[in-house]
Image (cartoon, rainbow, N blue to C red):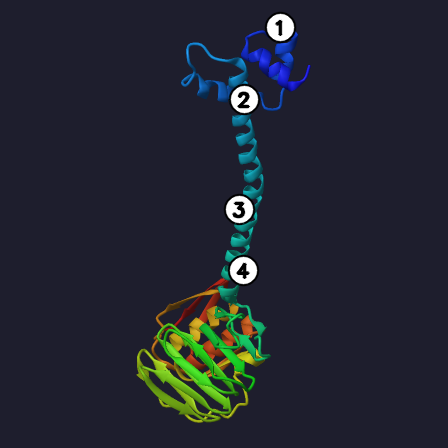
Amino acid sequence: MDRETLILKWLNNDLNDQELNAFKALDDYDDLMKLQQNLQGFKAETYNTSEEYDALNKALQNKKAQRSKSSWVNPFFRVAAILALCFGLYYYTTTLDTTVTTAMAQRTSIELPDNSSVELNAGSVLAFNKSHWKKERDVKLQGEAFFKVSKGSTFKVITSNGTVTVYGTQFNVKQRNNYFEVICYEGLVGVTYDTLETKLKPGDRFLIIDGKMIAKEKELRSKPSWINHESTFESMPYSRVIAEFERQYAVSVKLENVDATQLFTGSFTHDDINLALKSITLPLNVTYNKSNDKITIKGD
């Protein structure tokens, strides 16, 4: 039995069991039932079956038209949503900084988008943005790093203590707790600290410890000693030496009866902890005990 006949018989309440099952199997059965409920409120006490069929058929056609429109609109919104998501992800990933972190006793080399290179010392963090690099050659530094900068636009190293500005040079920046040091090895470096800029030529050093500027002699080396796995100090508070030792060997050092403010001149290797311990204790006539990653340095 065709669809039209089934609907007419349904409107007349004249469906047998077999026909009722066939009627329920129609694709638009649910729509017919909803439409019947909606039309009940407008039905007169007596009505013409053919007229009601025409009304139902017209309503079904409108429903199909809406579905047809929806079948086009829904994919459109799905595509729009996907495009919006992709754009959002692209914006998020391209504005996100690239961050490189070194743990204690770890070093790493980094190549920047303009082929400038960075050696990142232990316990340090460097961040930069690849997508903005052509406009701004800016890096953020926490810790210590040695830079070889390719010639080009202004290159900035931004730290919590100050900003280093260069145009193509080699220099070292060290920013630790209440410690800020910049050494120029090649070219010209500008160091901005407390809104004042200091120009450094090769061999010049800028050093601030606990908020005070410290005068230093010319740097004679062509690059920082830590690049060659050695830490070197000139008249440096012993506490700074110990902090660097802990950073390079990932150990904890406790001082007992040792003046942490006394000045130390010397160096220690990063490759042999026992030799390094002798290097930082013998000059001060102090002893040490070592147990795994815990070290105690004792004075008299």
Q: Give the distance between the C-alpha atoms of the residues marked 3 and 1, in whole angstroms.
A: 45 Å
Q: CA distance from mark 1 to mark 4?
A: 62 Å
Which tag, 2 or 3, sits closer to the chain's start?
Answer: 2
Residue lying farthest to the right in this orientation: 1
Residue 163 is drawn in which quadrant? bottom left
Three-letter code for the amino acid on which mark 2 is drawn: Asp
Of marks 2 and 3, the one in the foreground: 2
Quadrant location, the N terminus: top right
Which of the two discs, 1 and 4, labels the residue nearer the N terminus?
1
Identify the secondary structure beneath mark 2: helix
The amino acid type, in three-letter code, at marker 3 is Phe
Would you place residue 165 above or below residue 139 in this image?
A: below
Residue 16: which disc? 1
Three-letter code, disc 4: Tyr
**Which residue is the site of mark 3?**
77
Q: Amino acid at mark 1?
A: Asn
Q: Which mark is residue 54?
A: 2
Circle 4 sits on which residue?
Answer: 90
C-alpha span from label 2 to label 3: 34 Å
Q: Secondary structure at mark 1?
A: loop
Q: Residue at x 51, y 53 (%)?
A: 84
- Please state if 227 lies on the left or on the right of 263 as rendered: right
Residue 211: x percent and y percent?
A: 30, 79
How packed mark 1 is, by other alpha carbons closer than 10 Å (few <14, some 14-19, many 20 or more), is few
Indicate the secondary structure of the residue bearing disc 3.
Answer: helix
Q: Is residue 25 visible?
A: no
Label 3 crowd bin: few (<14), some (14–19), many (20+), radius 10 Å:
few
Pointer 1 and pointer 4: residues touching (CB < 8 Å)?
no
Asked if the residues shown at circle 2 and circle 1 are in contact, with their CB atoms under 8 angstroms apart, the answer is: no
